[in-house]
Amino acid sequence: MASVSSSPCSPQAVLPVPLPLQLLPRCRLPRLPLPPLGLSAGARRGGGLLLPLTPPAPRAAEGNDGRAFAKEEEVEEGSEEEERGAYDGARDAESAGASKGSGRFAADYVSLGIREPVYEVIEVKSNGRVSTKKISRRQLLKSSGLRLRDTRSVDPSLWLMNSMPSLLVREQAILLNLGSLRAIAMHERVLIFNYNSSGGKAFLELLLPRLNPRNINGGPAMPFQLEVVEAALLSRIQRLERRLMHVEPRVATLLEVLPNRLTGDVLEQLRLSKQSLVELGSRAGDLKQMLIDLLEDPHEIRKICIMGRNCTLDKLSDDVECSVPLEKHIAEEEEEEIEMLLENYLQRCESCHGQAERLLDSAREMEDSIAVNLSSRRLEVSRVELLLQVGTFCVAVGALIAGIFGMNLTSYLETNSWAFWATTGGIAVGAVAGFFLMYRYLKTRKIL
């Protein structure tokens, strides 16, 4: 019988006796195909994939010295190195593509129309230099040390939501929201939003002369941020006072004219004046409440004092701690000055608010007086109408009697000459008597 010998490297070969490691036949394992470049890292490692085992490719014929086998091994090792280099290059290319993809994603995000807002502001430095510049929100946050939520109070696009006056103190900046004035004051500069508005123009007119060294008159200069805060408060209160001075004489004139002259034009002027007083009182009251809240919070005032200095606030005692004792003394003096400054503007704001409230109360009292006057007139008209209705009733009774005698029926009275005068006199006397009786009844019942 012919014996069939199987190759020791074939899958069907079975070695009945375990051999030492040195005597085991040298077998080549088949090369597995590399994963595609588009797979993830887990797929490249073969995790989760079942790769089929293929039988080894036929070997080239070996010589007696085994040189063909060695040559084939060198060629295979070289090809494996080339494939490994290609695989590593593919991984690097894929990572570079991922980074480029993130850049493309950012570009696509911008292309969606969601752009970073850019503000056009006026920058006023402490030396009085004024310049117009455009600054993005990111640059604004980076230069001022603010957070994104802090800019909501000064963002011009949110003026409908942030109509309440506010003065927010942060570590490196002060945010001012006073009506149409929106500004960010820092240690050496101030950024003014909506500089073309009435509030922005009034603020610039007051701030720039204060920064001129010729207007100091030899006295000690205040810190720049305090100059900005004072100019902002002064411009706001002066605008309220000017508006009050414009409305007050008009309201006084209307109060003198209205009791004796009730016309549509006068009443319309009173309505417009009352509307102006309501708005003025509301704005003055909001500003007054803001100043009261600021005065009741000494922590905010001390934060203004230490701005731009090498000082900190103790978290427990809320005391000012400075590396230089002189700076601490200066900060304490500035705290007193700020309190006096806020007290002064609070008094002016209370005066404006009180005067507006008094004028508004006078206008409301005049409206009540006008309502009472109109009610009395309507009462007189109703009284006259009632009297006319009573008289009409009495005359209607006489007309009923006349209608009865007007029928073409024989009553034996038409033959007498005195019947006409008697009937006419009776109707007239009866109508007058009936009218007075009805009038007395209405007076007794207090209807008239």
Image (cartoon, helix red, strand yellow):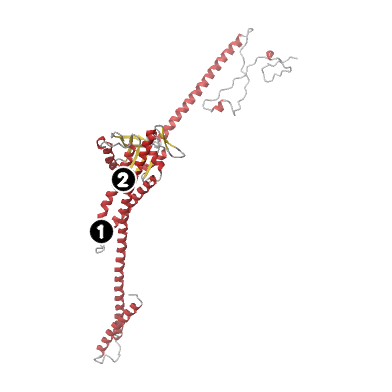
Question: As displayed, is residue 252 above or below residue 302?
Answer: below
Q: Residue furthest right?
A: 1
* Near-viewer residue (223 or 24): 223
Q: Amino acid at mark 1?
A: Leu
* Near-viewer residue (238 or 108): 238
- The x, y position of residue 277, in whole percent, is 31, 54
Residue 202 seen in render? yes
Quadrant where the image shows the C terminus? bottom left
* Near-viewer residue (405 or 169): 169
- The x, y position of residue 100, in whole percent, is 45, 28
Q: Comparing marks 2 and 1, which lies closer to the viewer? A: 2
Residue at (31, 65) in percent of width and height: 372
Q: CA distance from mark 2 to mark 1?
A: 28 Å
Q: Residue furthest top?
A: 65
Residue 164 seen in render? no
Question: As displayed, is residue 410 above or below residue 439?
Answer: below
Residue at (62, 14) in percent of width and height: 59
Instruction: Name which quarter of the figure residue 208 lies in.
Output: top left
Question: As displayed, is residue 318 above or below residue 351?
Answer: above
Q: Amino acid at mark 2?
A: Arg
Decide: few, some or many residues near mark 1? Use Cα within 10 Å; few <14, some 14-19, many ≥20: some
Pointer 2 or 1: first along the chain? 2
The mark found on residue 254 in the picture is 1
Question: As displayed, is residue 163 above or below residue 19?
Answer: below
The mark found on residue 236 in the picture is 2
Instruction: Name which quarter of the figure residue 300 lies in.
Output: top left
